[in-house]
Image: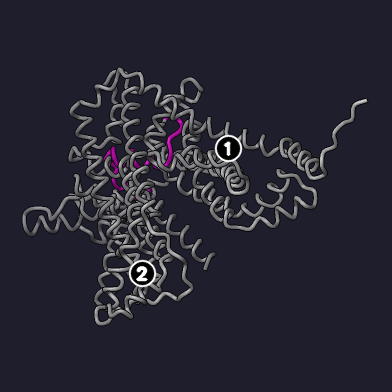
Amino acid sequence: MTSTPLLPAGSAIRARGAVRRRTDGVDALVVALWLACGGLILLPIGALLVLAGRGDQLGVLLHGDVLQAGANSLFSATVSALAAVVIGTTFAVLLDRTDLPGRTVLRLLALSPLLMPPFVGAIAWLGIAGPTSPLNLWWRGTFGAPLWSIYGADGVILLLTIHSYPIAMLIVSAALRRIPTDLEQAARISGAGPARALTSVTVPLLRPALVSSFVLIAVGNLADFGIPSIIGLPERFVTLATLVYRYLQSGTVDDPLAVVATIGVVLLVLALLALVADGLLARRGWELDSSNAVPERTPLGHARVGVGAMMWAVVLLITVLPLLALLTQTLLRAPGVPLTWENLTLDHLVRAVTTPSALAGAANSTMLASLAAVICGILGLAIGVVVARTSGRAPRALGAVAMVPQAIPGIVIAVAWLILAPSLGLFNTPWLILVAYVTSFTALVVQAVAAPLSATPTSAEEAARVAGAGRLRALVDISARMATPAAVAGAVIVAVTAVRELTLSVLLLSPGSQTLGVAIFNFQQAGAFSTASAWSLIVALVGLAVIGLATRRTS
């Protein structure tokens, strides 16, 4: 008679726990989320790489127009990113570490360019420095030539800088809050003045934040479409984004999809190289202990009034003047006529809000943005909870894959889905734009959910497990519920971003799926400048209203 060996009590409990862990549904959830991310992210990127990897279109990269467009893209992205980092860092230091007057209102105004789509900002600035702007008309009448025309490379760089410096400002401001003020106080005790302590101690410690903001802005500006198409093309300043659009629309090259796929891979490689360089440089940064000391603002002394006045002038020039230019362009009977009461009319505004194509575009944008917000909210909530509350290689890799689209220019995502669209039955349907939105914007919700949830103690989930709940039940009842407000906030950001998006929509446009951004762009390209300005003004005011309500709710 053989005896059956008895397992120790602890081993039996661990064995039962292992069986329960395998069958409690969390692993199935991870697999389902992997399938979703694979279909939305890995599949289109893989299709892009496969089509470009055939090799029969590599020679197109050596064509003169592609080389020129690539050089223009690198030049404008690099210069605008450098300028944006300088401006954003200056604003962050003045607003967070000095006694500048009116800091709260100035910070809100300085961040407002984030709310205005870049192509809307381009239309607005045409009213300030375009050939028919009141300033240039007056200058031409007085001196015989315009003061400065915004068309061309310098205008593209200026507007890319204006619409991206708030990103640097946000990143540097967050880094400033992590720098202990004890270091500045030690420098002050050693005899350094306030300005010397700020520039010799604090600013050097911001180096990782400066590099990160530069990389993020440069990658975003590298493939921007709206500003180069409106400001650069009239002076034949062609970038890779506008060149891809021309290839897809004009049919001037053989097999245009393979050509733009090859260009898309080049953009993808440049973006990934920039992010790898950023990661390597970040490892050389300093890890500082946090400090409970109250930040001591550097007194500006006699320069306080002058610096404050200059700051107010620059911020108002950047934020309020474009809105006034849009209003002027909307109300004037025709571009270039004198700004008098007799030349003001509401006809353009009425025509804009009654134009069928624009109304259809607004309806499509609202529908697509709402669906994208719901899908991204649910998917991002699930991924964020799994990444923040489960361990293992699969959840960590899932989080990394979900965040990949943040490092990919929108034009690359659009081209990738164009390749897949015919085989999936999405070609010439609005759902092609929707899946591209979901691919691009799910990372916004994942980031909004995972970051705060990772910093929240797991005691509630542990209590649920002790009470008999499985891992999946604890994640759904505890973690998901705690993270739902963050997911809703992320979904709102997705909706606001998608409703005014241009790059994806203009490349994936199909009959009956025109969006509001494409409608405004088409008005501008067709010479209906007043109608384009009217809709741009509406979009800008709605964006400002959204941030005003959000600020009021959180104040």
- For label 1, the crowd category at 10 Å Cα-Cα, with few meaning under 14, some 14 to 19 and many 20 or more, is some
The reply to whether residue 498 is visible in this rendering is yes
Quadrant of residue 262 within the rendered picture: top left
Label number found at residue 482: none
User: Residue flagged by tag 1: what amino acid is it?
Assistant: Ala
Q: Which residue is drawn at 42% across and 74% down?
A: 295
Q: Which segment is the magenta one?
A: 510-535
Residue ID at (37%, 60%) = 172
Which residue is pictured at 30% across the width and 73% down the height? Answer: 197
> Taking the image as drawn, is residue 333 in sight?
no
Q: How many labels does the image show?
A: 2
* Residue placed most toward the observer, 355 or 324: 324
Q: Main secondary structure of the magenta part?
A: helix
Asked if residue 525 lies in the magenta stretch, the reply is yes
Q: Which amino acid does label 2 sit on?
A: Leu
Q: Is residue 223 shown above or below 102?
A: above
Query: Any magenta on residue 29?
Result: no
Mark linked to residue 394: 1
523 relative position to 418: left or right: left
The residue closer to the viewer here, 19 or 529, is 19
What residue is pinned by disc 2? 95
Q: Is residue 7 left or right of residue 458?
A: right
In the displayed orientation, state which residue is furthest to the front: 1
